[in-house]
Image (cartoon, rainbow, N blue to C red):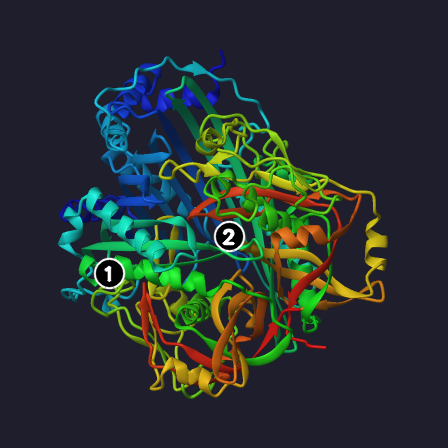
């Protein structure tokens, strides 16, 4: 199958080339998904299916078009190529359009990043169902206060990515993933429900967190929220628990996009090599980590992956670039092109890693007289252009260094530049979940809106 | 006996007829499932990106396939295939069938064609309109944005459209089809002045063809994005704390979508994970509130001629004068509640199982004048445009992000405020609605709703509404 997809990709490139197209690349994927979801110890849903798709980018006279299809028959692929050539003619010439420079392509044997687990090919639906059942049961067993569940799920994917272009690049790699997730729900005294979920997702089965541990964590998080109240509006130190630091990393991941720089729509524009964050802050985009969800041997245009320092001791170092936006901005690609079926490549993160510090998470709270331990964020309240940040939140009060009562229905707000500068401590509790690794950290002040 | 365009299309394109559908349904029920349904889809989607006064690129994508769902009690078996050969269809059906485990097959039923209404029509859809006509609209938008203010340094515009053919066959004997056009025109403007940069986005569309642009010009959409970006240049810090909030008519309907709409989707209530579980007949909102979910609004982005389980859309009054009337039902939940589906069973594509989803959700107008509502507020916030929202179904907390807002001081709208998040608790906030205007407005077609990783187009609407207390997540204290 791996060879099949690569030969389809190469065939698409050949077809376009024969029709006189200047530059072309083809991206072909196959993904099989299987999942078992249970709720209250009964099977709720089983999904089992495979899908394929092919996409072609045609650059003709510096005019770009992208077409895709899920029909991989030769006739449909020919139609797709012809449609792309026709569609490219409506675009205007763009001097920056084009494939990556040949020198940037990953023409050597790509590194084996261990993104594929053979065990995932053979795991049965029944086995997944049993794991989901154990996960949910562990949540209920953790505490009698867990009275309901939104279900537990175990699922896997098995896929292949193939990429070929007219500059001589042709490679493919297989990848797998597996996840376990559960949401636990408690009844609070005020008639409201309190809920939380926990999950694990990895490229290999053996790396997954134990399903029962996932269940217990979801339960513990939900139970801890019982009795949550609002907080009075104030400015206070805020300790970010590692899971919400992941969300902060996600926002930074958008702000470091070279495309956002080109659009002048990121608050980091014009801040390269400036001291933006606290000296404690070091963030890296690392696509070469073995077995991680965001790892990739080459990017969505076939450029060799490399580790990119984003922040070093608080100094903002680099934007992430694909080849188009790099040319546009007079830079070089950083091998960060993300690829989707129905759009041209655009810069995207791989694994975002925030370097841990050396104090315990308890020590983050220890010095705080009156503060907030932030455990959940919700909503989309970030203005990337200005860095204004305002999001819904839940967490716990910190009083005299101790985590006390749960709080809900509050907002946290500030400007991302100030927020990054105000990081005054980072803990050693590195949490790897999906495509990011982050510890807990503390900001010396943040506005908290409540009553 | 209607034979809608979608049915003919699916038959011509894929060779799927009643006999083939019956044979696949038989396979799906081979292990005694209670119900099976086949969802065929063919989607042709396109986009044109216009940036810095040139067409940067154009895309087109084709997707097609069939999803098969088998129910055994409340358990769902789901499989899909892009290969529409009979053998592949039967393989997918056999996979989904295994959710059931009885020894005998469920007997087949003949399907009857259902005629669907026409809340929109595919005539004049934009997908096959020559690209140059679309580019001309984008050029007009670009010029209008730049002419609006000299600080507009960038106008990025895209034209996104699709035409989707669906056909549904169910083992309880229904067959329905639909052709669903969808167009959206988006403008993003960057204003640069004295080193200050601000961006704003606006857009619109619906289940329409090029006729949309006769009602709403590209110039109007572009000027709106430009106006908001320029306005933000003089925005002040938003306040932090709890204040009265006046929601302007139209876009603010996102409040209803998040605060109550999701909580009334029947799946959450069947599982008792919603704050609105077991509360039908209770007062859950101010008596001024009558909330409707209506999939039948002509040409609206959230409308459907048939839902993705083959049921007809309706105008569902979910809250009448503050009293909860019922939930938004799909087939599975309706069976559990012993009621009828409300035409809210929707899915993103053939790769996705259907769930109860909103269509166009709005609140009916009241009798206050919008001016009087604003005059009644001594210190508060006036919200006009939004970028998105989210809700935690279980605890009822919901947020929405304001992109155009103002202070209200002494009954007058004063300074614009920077982008800010509002947070409230659904069941509480709706009891705090203290005035409802007579100026009901449906938002333009620019909203997409996400649930369980599935996106569907929706509509929202509301008249000018006063909420007496809601938490505003600004940075200015005191």
**x and y percent of residue B242 in the render?**
69, 66
Residue A350, located in which quarter of the rendered image? bottom left
Viewed as shown, does residue B84 lie left or right of B424?
left
In the foreground, A334 or B66: B66
In the foreground, B345 or B444: B345
Q: Nearer the viewer, mark 1 or mark 2?
A: 2
**x and y percent of residue A261 in the render?**
47, 70
Residue that lies at the very extreme toward the front in this rendered image = A144
Quadrant of the frame with the C terminus of chain B? bottom right
Dot 1: few (<14), some (14–19), or many (≥20) neighbours within 10 Å?
some
In the foreground, A267 or B129: A267
Residue that lies at the very extreme toward the top in this rendered image = B1
Q: CA distance from mark 1 to mark 2?
A: 27 Å
Viewed as shown, does residue A110 lie left or right of B370?
left
Q: Residue at x 30, y 40 (%)?
A: A47
Q: Is residue A388 above or below residue A43?
A: below
**x and y percent of residue B107 in the render?**
30, 15
**Secondary element type, mark 2:** loop
Q: Residue at x 31, y 35 (%)?
A: B77
Residue B154, located in which quarter of the rendered image? bottom right
Task: Kindly identify which residue carries mark 2.
Answer: B394
Check residue A208 in the rendering and tell me which mark sits there, or answer none.
1
Dot 2: few (<14), some (14–19), or many (≥20) neighbours within 10 Å?
many
Determine the chain carrying the residue at label 1: A
Q: Is residue A362 visible?
A: yes
Residue A18, located in which quarter of the rendered image? top left
Q: Is residue A414 above or below residue B443?
A: below
Q: Are marks 1 and 2 on the same chain?
A: no
């Amino acid at each position: 199958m791996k060879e099949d997809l690569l030969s389809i990709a190469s065939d698409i490139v050949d077809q376009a080339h024969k029709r006189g197209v200047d530059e072309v690349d083809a991206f072909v994927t196959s993904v099989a998904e299987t999942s078992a979801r249970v709720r209250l110890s009964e099977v709720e849903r089983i999904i089992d299916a495979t899908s394929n798709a092919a996409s072609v980018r045609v650059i003709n006279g510096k005019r770009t078009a992208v077409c895709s299809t899920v029909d991989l028959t030769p006739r449909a692929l020919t139609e797709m190529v012809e449609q792309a050539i026709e569609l490219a003619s409506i675009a205007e010439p763009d001097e920056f359009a084009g494939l990556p420079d040949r020198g940037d392509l990953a023409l050597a044997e790509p590194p084996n990043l261990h993104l594929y687990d053979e065990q995932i090919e053979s795991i049965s639906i029944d086995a997944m169902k049993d794991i989901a059942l154990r996960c949910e049961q562990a949540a209920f067993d953790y505490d009698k206060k867990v009275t309901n569940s939104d279900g537990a799920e175990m699922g896997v994917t098995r896929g292949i990515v193939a990429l070929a272009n007219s500059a001589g690049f042709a490679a493919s790699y297989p990848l797998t993933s597996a996840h376990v997730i559960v949401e636990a729900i408690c009844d609070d005294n005020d008639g409201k429900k309190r809920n939380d979920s926990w999950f694990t997702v990895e490229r290999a089965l053996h790396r997954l967190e134990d399903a029962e541990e996932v269940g217990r964590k979801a339960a513990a998080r939900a139970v801890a929220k019982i009795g949550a109240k609002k907080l009075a509006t104030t400015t206070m130190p805020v300790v970010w628990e590692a899971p919400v630091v992941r969300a902060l990393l996600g926002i930074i991941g958008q702000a470091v996009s070279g495309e956002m720089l080109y659009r002048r729509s990121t608050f980091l524009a014009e801040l390269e090599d400036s001291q933006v964050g606290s000296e404690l802050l070091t963030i890296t985009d690392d696509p070469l980590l073995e077995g991680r969800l965001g790892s990739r041997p080459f990017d969505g245009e076939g450029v060799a992956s490399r580790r990119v320092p984003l922040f070093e001791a608080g100094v903002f170092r680099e934007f992430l670039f694909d080849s188009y936006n790099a040319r546009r901005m007079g830079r070089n690609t950083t091998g960060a092109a993300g690829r989707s079926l129905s759009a041209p490549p655009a810069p995207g993160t791989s694994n975002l890693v925030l370097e841990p510090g050396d104090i315990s998470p308890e020590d983050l709270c220890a010095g705080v007289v009156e503060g907030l331990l932030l455990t959940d964020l919700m909503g989309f309240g970030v203005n990337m252009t200005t860095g204004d940040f305002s999001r819904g939140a839940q967490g716990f009060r910190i009083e005299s260094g101790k985590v006390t009562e749960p709080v809900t229905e509050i907002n946290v707000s500030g400007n991302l530049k100030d927020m990054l500068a105000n990081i005054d401590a980072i803990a050693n509790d590195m949490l790897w979940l999906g495509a990011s690794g982050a510890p807990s950290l503390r900001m010396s002040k943040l506005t908290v809106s409540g009553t | 006996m209607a034979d809608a365009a979608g049915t003919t299309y699916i038959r011509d394109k894929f060779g799927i007829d009643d006999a083939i559908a019956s044979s696949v349904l038989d396979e799906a029920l081979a292990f005694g499932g209670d119900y099976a349904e086949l969802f065929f889809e063919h989607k042709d989607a396109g986009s044109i990106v216009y940036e810095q006064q040139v067409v940067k690129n154009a895309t087109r994508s084709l997707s097609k396939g069939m999803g098969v769902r088998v129910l055994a009690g409340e358990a769902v078996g789901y499989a899909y295939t892009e290969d529409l050969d009979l053998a592949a269809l039967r393989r997918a059906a056999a996979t989904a069938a295994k959710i059931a485990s009885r020894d005998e097959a469920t007997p087949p039923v003949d399907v009857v064609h259902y005629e669907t209404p026409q809340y929109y029509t595919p005539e004049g859809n934009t997908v096959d309109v020559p690209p140059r006509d679309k580019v001309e609209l984008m050029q007009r938008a670009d010029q209008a944005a730049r002419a609006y203010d000299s600080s507009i340094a960038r106008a990025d515009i895209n034209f996104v459209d699709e035409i989707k053919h669906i056909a549904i066959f169910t083992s309880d004997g229904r067959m329905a089809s639909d052709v669903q056009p969808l167009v959206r025109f988006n403008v993003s403007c960057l204003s640069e002045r004295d080193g200050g940069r601000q961006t704003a986005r606006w857009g619109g569309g619906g289940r329409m063809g090029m006729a949309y642009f006769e009602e709403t010009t590209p110039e109007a959409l572009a000027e709106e994005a430009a106006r908001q970006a320029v306005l933000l240049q003089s925005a002040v810090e938003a306040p932090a704390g709890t204040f009265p909030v006046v929601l302007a008519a139209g876009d603010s309907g996102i409040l209803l979508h998040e605060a109550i709409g999701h909580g009334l989707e029947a799946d959450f209530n069947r599982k008792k994970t919603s704050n609105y579980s077991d509360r039908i007949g209770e007062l859950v909102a101010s008596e001024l509130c009558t909330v409707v979910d209506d999939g039948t609004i002509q040409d609206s982005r959230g409308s459907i001629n048939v839902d993705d389980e083959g049921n007809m859309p309706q105008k569902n009054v979910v809250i009448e004068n503050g009293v909860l009337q019922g939930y938004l039902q799909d087939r599975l939940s309706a069976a559990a509640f012993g009621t009828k589906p409300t035409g809210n069973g929707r899915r993103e594509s053939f790769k996705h199982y259907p769930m109860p989803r909103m269509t166009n959700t709005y609140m009916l107008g009241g009798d206050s004048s919008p001016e009087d509502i604003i005059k009644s507020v001594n210190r508060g916030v006036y919200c006009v445009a939004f970028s998105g929202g989210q809700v935690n179904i279980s605890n009822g907390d919901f947020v929405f992000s304001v992109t155009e807002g103002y202070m209200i001081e002494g009954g007058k709208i004063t300074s614009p405020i920077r982008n800010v998040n509002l947070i409230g608790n659904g069941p509480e906030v709706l009891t705090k609605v203290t005035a409802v205007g007579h100026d009901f407005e449906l938002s333009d077609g620019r909203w997409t709703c996400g649930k369980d990783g599935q996106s569907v187009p929706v509509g929202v609407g509301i008249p000018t509404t006063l909420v007496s207390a809601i938490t505003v997540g600004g940075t200015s204290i005191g």
